[in-house]
Image (tube, helix red, strand yellow):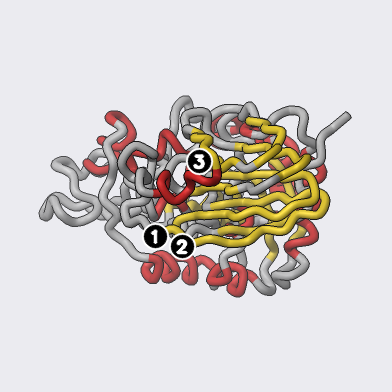
Amino acid sequence: MIKKCLGCGTLMQNEDINRPGYTTDISRDYCKRCFRLMHYNEIPKVFATNKEFLQVIDYQLKKKNLFVYLIDIFSFPISFNKDITDRLRGKDVIIVINKIDLLPKSLNPQNLINFVSKKKKKIFFKVVAIHLISAKKGYYLTDLMQHLELFRKERDICILGLASVGKSSFINAILKQFGEAKSDTIATSPIPGTTLEEITIPFFLDNRGFIDTPGLISQESVLTQVSPKDYNLLLPTAEISPVTYQLFGSYTYFLGGLVYLAFNDIKNASLVIYKAKNLPITKVKTDNLAKTLTKVGLTILPAAKEINIVERQIIVDGVKTIFIGGFLIIQITGKLEFLLGYNQGLGVKEYGNVFRRTN
């Protein structure tokens, strides 16, 4: 009997426990790996590489699907992966920005749509719509479904995006809100590599449906640098309460052991940090920066598995928003220069005032 696991999309087999799709009973819907992931939150082993994931995506791109390019609030600057965007030229694409439930309600989401709209002009593929949603909370899924029905034209809808942006959670939310599913159908986890092959879920009356694909693992993401046991400290899971500092004098702020902001002789500026609730902030005098760096990985945690701090001089004249590694957003207001330290390899993107507040 040939059967695919509903969790990761791999062929079920009962011959080799070390290969994907292993189960003791092929009549089951989920392999052992996905069953333990869904019921025991067990960290799965990653079996595939980006090269293998791209082969799956290339197979889908040969079809005349409607493509949903899913990105999330914290990682959208690194989400426009060139390996994917180059392949999307000539395709019909809807950009969906997930996890807006993480943003404070004081921020205007329309400004984020405007920002992404400007950015997509630089990647040269056709975008038929941009939507903000929360798969977790079900926000704005009805509006999105109306657009999906409008542009689908009797085609399957293929979901693309980086690892851990919520592709499987998005499909699960659709199946529960607009279908008959009572619980998650596809295995979900923040661990990169949860989905190993494409998963096709029939949904529409014309026998078309949703296709989940493996997420490419961005080397700029913090997920590649830290142990999975630290994900709960780094990844926001609920609406963020920004941490705000009025900056005066010479102080350095450590965000765990992965990022620091070193200020010298600041007269009047402000710092707003959007981060996971559990990510600790350590404030020290900038004169003690070198001494404090020796504690990274020891008492200043979480830290990268391989610590290699690099520095960048940041110039601010007005408002600057900086996205770091898919887990951290900082916004600086004022006229100043400061030193940004971060573990080498983390994606660091500088922009203007991305998040303007509502009145």
Residue drawn 75% across the image and 52% down it: 336
Sooner in the amino-acid sequence: mark 3 or mark 1: 3
Residue wearing tag 2: 345
Q: Amino acid at mark 1?
A: Asn
Answer few, some or many: residues within 10 Å of disc 3's Cα (few below 14, many 20 plus, some between 14 and 19): many
With respect to residue 136, does 154 lie above or below? below
Distance of label 1 from label 2 (alpha carbons): 9 Å
Check the image and name the residue furthest to the left. 15
Q: Name which of mark 1 and mark 2 comes first in the sequence.
A: 1
Q: Considering depth in this image, is 285 or 329 the residue closer to the camera?
A: 285
Q: Secondary structure at mark 3?
A: strand
CA gap between label 2 and label 3 equals 16 Å
**Earlier sequence position, callout 2 versus callout 3:** 3
Q: Which SS class for mark 2?
A: loop
What residue is drawn where x is 38% and y is 54%?
A: 225
Vertical side of 328 occupied by 40: above or below: above
Split into 4 quadrants, where in the image is the C terminus?
Answer: top right
User: Which residue, given by chain and number where applicable, does mark 1 sit on?
Assistant: 308
* Left-right relation of 329 to 60: right
The reply to whether dot 1 and dot 2 touch (C-beta < 8 Å) is: yes
Q: Position of residue 66 (x, y in %)?
A: 64, 59
Quarter of the image holding residue 151? Answer: bottom right
What's the mark number on residue 212?
none
Q: CA distance from mark 3 to mark 1?
A: 15 Å
Q: Are marks 2 and 3 in contact (CB under 8 Å)?
A: no
**Residue under numbered circle 3:** 255
* Residue displayed at 48% across by 61% down: 310
Question: Residue 294: where, in percent of width, then height?
Answer: 36, 48
Is 61 above or below relative to 25? Answer: below
- The residue type indicated by label 3 comes to Leu
